[in-house]
Amino acid sequence: MAIELKDKETIENIVSFSSRLKQNQQKIKLVAPENLHITIKFLEDIK
């Protein structure tokens, strides 16, 4: 289950923050800004 983000300023802030996390070698998966979402709960991979 996820929440799609549409506010441009929010997306830009999250992209900036996630880039800083990645630079500090935090274990995160970066996605393109147009695919940005917040995962509430990961159910399972779909096949």
Image: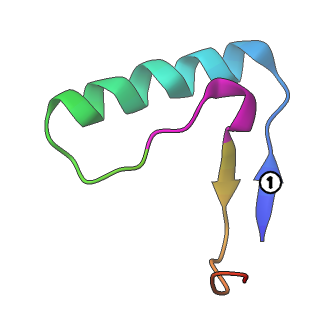
Using the image, determine if residue 1 lies above or below residue 3.
Answer: below
Viewer-side residue, 34 vs 2: 34
**How far from the left and from the top, in percent, is residue 6?**
85, 29
Residue at x-position 82% and y-position 22%: 7
**How far from the left and from the top, in percent, is residue 36?**
67, 38
| Magenta-span inclusion, residue 10 | no
Q: Quadrant of the C terminus?
A: bottom right
Residue at x-position 55% and y-position 19%: 13
Q: Residues within 10 Å of mark 1 (few under 14, many from 20)?
A: few
Tell me which amino acid carries mark 1. Answer: Ile
Q: Is residue 4 left or right of residue 41?
A: right
Residue at x-position 68% and y-position 23%: 10
Q: Is residue 8 left or right of residue 42?
A: right
Q: Quadrant of residue 30?
A: top left
Using the image, determine if residue 1 lies above or below residue 22.
Answer: below
In the orientation shown, which residue stands out farthest toward the front?
47
**How far from the left and from the top, in percent, is residue 28?**
35, 50
How many numbered tags mark residues here?
Answer: 1
Using the image, determine if residue 45 lies above or below residue 40.
Answer: below
Q: Which residue is mark 1?
A: 3
Q: Is residue 20 left or right of residue 38?
A: left
**How far from the left and from the top, in percent, is residue 8?**
77, 15
Q: Looking at the image, what colour scheme do you see?
A: rainbow
In the orientation shown, which residue stands out farthest toward the left?
24
Q: Quadrant of residue 42?
A: bottom right
Q: Secondary structure at mark 1?
A: strand
Residue at x-position 77% and y-position 71%: 1
Magenta stretch bounds: 30-36
